Image (tube, helix red, strand yellow):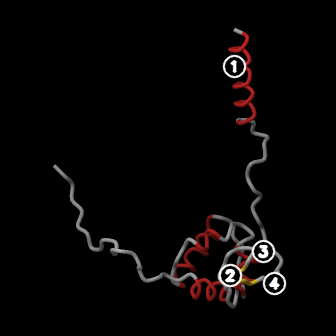
Amino acid sequence: MKTVKYISLLIFLIVLVACNPNTETEKPIATEPLPVTEAQIKDGKDTATGLLAGEGLNVVKSHCLACHSSALIVQNRFTREGWHKKIVWMQETQGLWDLGDSEDAVLDYLATNYAPEEFRGRRKPLADVEWYELD
């Protein structure tokens, strides 16, 4: 019987800690770019972030990594226009500041290093598929 009480008490404490609204779980939102730091390059990548070496890397690190990790950049591939749309979306919905004169450098870097790639798998994804409902 005592074991059941201790287990119940333990579960209650875990739930209490997990649901406490005063716990700080979210990162603060950045309101300005990070200070510009020089990249340390090894094997063509910045050792701190994994971003590809190239002109504009330090500007991208300053602006983009103030709010999110480099993984969001690395996992995406867009044209210059696509990257611009993402920046506008972040400005309209996520509180991203005006990039000012840095915007062209950011877009040049992203469009050069993280542009769409030609498919290299065993089979290309299906295209122009006409979907229909099964009866």
Mark 4 and mark 3: span between their CA atoms? Answer: 15 Å
Q: Give x and y (percent) for residue 135.
A: 16, 49
Q: Is residue 31 left or right of residue 123?
A: right
The tag earlier along the polypeptide, 2 or 4, is 4
Which residue does the numbered mark 1 point to in the structure image?
A: 8
Q: Amino acid at mark 4?
A: Glu
Mark 3 and mark 2: span between their CA atoms? Answer: 21 Å
Give the mark count.
4
19 in relation to 132, above or below: above
Residue density around tag 4, few if under 14, some if 14–19, many if 20 or more, within 10 Å: few
Q: Residue at the location (30% across, 74% down)?
A: 127
- Which mark lies nearer to you, 2 or 4? 2
Give residue 33's mark. 3
Asked which secondary structure carries label 3, the reply is loop
The tag earlier along the polypeptide, 4 or 3, is 3
Q: Amino acid at mark 3?
A: Pro
Q: Amino acid at mark 2?
A: Lys
103 in relation to 26, above or below: below
Marks 3 and 2 close (CB-CB < 8 Å): no
Q: Give x and y (percent) for residue 16.
A: 73, 30
Give residue 45's mark. 2
Residue that extends furthest to the top in the rendered view of this protein: 1
67 in relation to 44, above or below: above
